[in-house]
Amino acid sequence: MRSGPSGRIEVLSTGRLRVTTWLPSDYADLRALHSDPLVMRHMRSGVESAAETRARLDRFLREQVELGWTKWRLEDADRRLVGRAGFNLDGSDLADGQWRELGYVLAPGLWGLGLATEVAGALVGWHRAHPDPRLHAGLCAYAFAENGASRRVLEKVGFTLVGEEWRSGVPQVRYELA
């Protein structure tokens, strides 16, 4: 990880995106992303209130210090926030046998350009290079059952469909990567 001029730490980069740590000043940009109905239509939380986005950013800030990983900030070549991607726990508490869950959200203007596949593949590599001994060695991911684009991304980066679950009242499919 490298620290940049803004004080951000670069976690990893792909050909077109940088994955960086969050700063408290990222609230307005994250709020804009999480209040967009198009962005949030395939997220369990749906469109977030200002307080929900503040709590989410606070959690990301805490996790990146306490766990060493979170759903990090995605930025483009101009250092603008264009999404978030990384990991959370497949469950509520850190416990033996728990899985890291991969997730990503991109601004709609970037859909269909292969960026989700690019960053998901890079994060799979990061996961393998940075195992968390407190967790299961594998990686899981969920997608809404009807979200074919996200399902294709997961399959392209090596995930295998293992089943369907109802989560937050919505049919979702679970993928795993050994």
Image (tube, grey):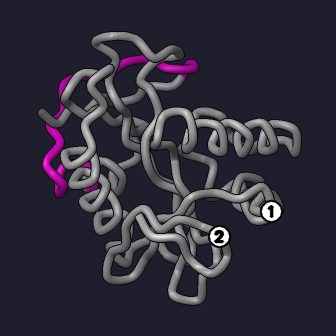
Q: Earlier in the sequence, mark 2 or mark 1?
A: 2
Residues at marks 2 and 1 touching, judged by CB atoms closer than 8 Å: no
157 w.r.t. 20: above or below: above
Q: Quadrant of residue 4?
A: bottom right
**Position of residue 31 measured from the top left corner of the image (x, y, whole percent):** 79, 56
**111 or 106, nearer to the observer:** 106
79 w.r.t. 142: above or below: below
Q: Residue furthest right?
A: 50
Mark 2, other Cα within 10 Å: few <14 / some 14–19 / many ≥20:
few
Report the amino acid beneath label 2.
Gly
Q: CA distance from mark 2 to mark 1?
A: 11 Å
Dot 1 falls on a residue whose secondary structure is helix
Q: Quadrant of the C terminus?
A: top left
Span of residues in magenta: 153-169
Left or right: 50, with 78 as reference point: right
Dot 2 falls on a residue whose secondary structure is loop
Residue under label 2: 7
The residue that appears at 37% across and 34% down in the rendered structure is 101
The residue that appears at 25% across and 37% down in the rendered structure is 131
The residue that appears at 44% across and 27% down in the rendered structure is 89
Left or right: 77, with 102 as reference point: right
**Position of residue 97 measured from the top left corner of the image (x, y, whole percent):** 28, 12
Q: Quadrant of residue 5?
A: bottom right
Q: Which mark is in front, 2 or 1?
A: 2
Whether residue 103 is in magenta: the answer is no
Residue under label 1: 25
